[in-house]
Image: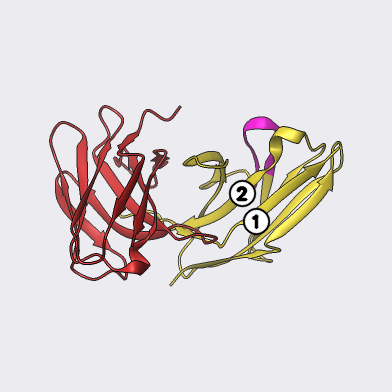
Amino acid sequence: ETGVTQSPTHLIKTRGQQVTLRCSSQSGHNTVSWYQQALGQGPQFIFQYYREEENGRGNFPPRFSGLQFPNYSSELNVNALELDDSALYLCASSLVSSGQETQYFGPGTRLLVL
Amino acid sequence: AQSVTQLGSHVSVSEGALVLLRCNYSSSVPPYLFWYVQYPNQGLQLLLKYTTGATLVKGINGFEAEFKKSETSFHLTKPSAHMSDAAEYFCAVSGSGGYNKLIFGAGTRLAVHP
């Protein structure tokens, strides 16, 4: 158990809709990262939030956005869903104080876009 | 820029045999290296990590990996495979510092036969 939870576990949406995925980090962790894992591939970095500010972004369009809250929870929002957005979405929390810190992953939310 | 190549998308071993999963990385800065394991329908669990210091790193469940800078490799080994080791294994690299996004390889699926 990593202490990181995600909801919902599964979700089905149709193309063009919007979706919000939620993550609850380990208590005290000030950083959350989101990853997209397509079927049969390794996770790809979407973005990272540090102390409620975006701290870096991967090669994803602006329709992928996020929020981090003071209570160690965070959200990933995806607008105008496309079929290729179907994937497992993972969040990972860490405590960044000095140098590299270990990222602890949640179980993921599996999104299917029809 | 950083990248990870995992040689062999599928590896099959007999129970009790040596497990060797290969990982090569590319990094323009001193790398931090990780191995994560993913069981079916679950998130990622950290097996072990290399940041600095001793190049032979021991992890959970009897796994270990050796950082070889000259070969840009970080192969994962376990002397004796167990049926419960069957899973997907991901090698990842990141840089040092607070912005620590993980770059993952495509993964290696390990099958263990009785």
Packing grade of label 1 (10 A; few <14, some 14-19, many >=20) is: many
Kind of residue sitting beneath label 2: Glu
Please, is residue B100 above or below residue B42 in the view?
below
Is there CB contact under 8 Å for labels 2 and 1? yes
Secondary structure of the residue carrying tag 2 is: strand
Disc 1 target residue? B108
**Colour red, chain:** A
Q: Colour of chain B?
A: yellow
Residue B48, position in %: x, y?
A: 57, 40
Tell me where the magenta segment starts and ends, as one range.
B55-64
Please, is residue A16 above or below residue B58 in the view?
below
Coloration of the structure image: by chain
Q: Is residue B72 magenta?
A: no
Label 2: chain letter: B
Q: Residue at x 33, y 39 (%)?
A: A94
Kind of residue sitting beneath label 1: Thr
Total number of numbered discs in the rendering: 2
Q: Which numbered circle lies on residue B78?
A: none
Disc 2 target residue? B88
Label 1: chain letter: B
Q: Residue at x 76, y 51 (%)?
A: B20
The reply to whether residue A87 is in sight is yes
Residue B56, position in %: x, y?
A: 67, 44
The reply to whether residue B98 is in sight is no
Query: Separation of disc 2 and disc 1 at Cα?
Result: 6 Å
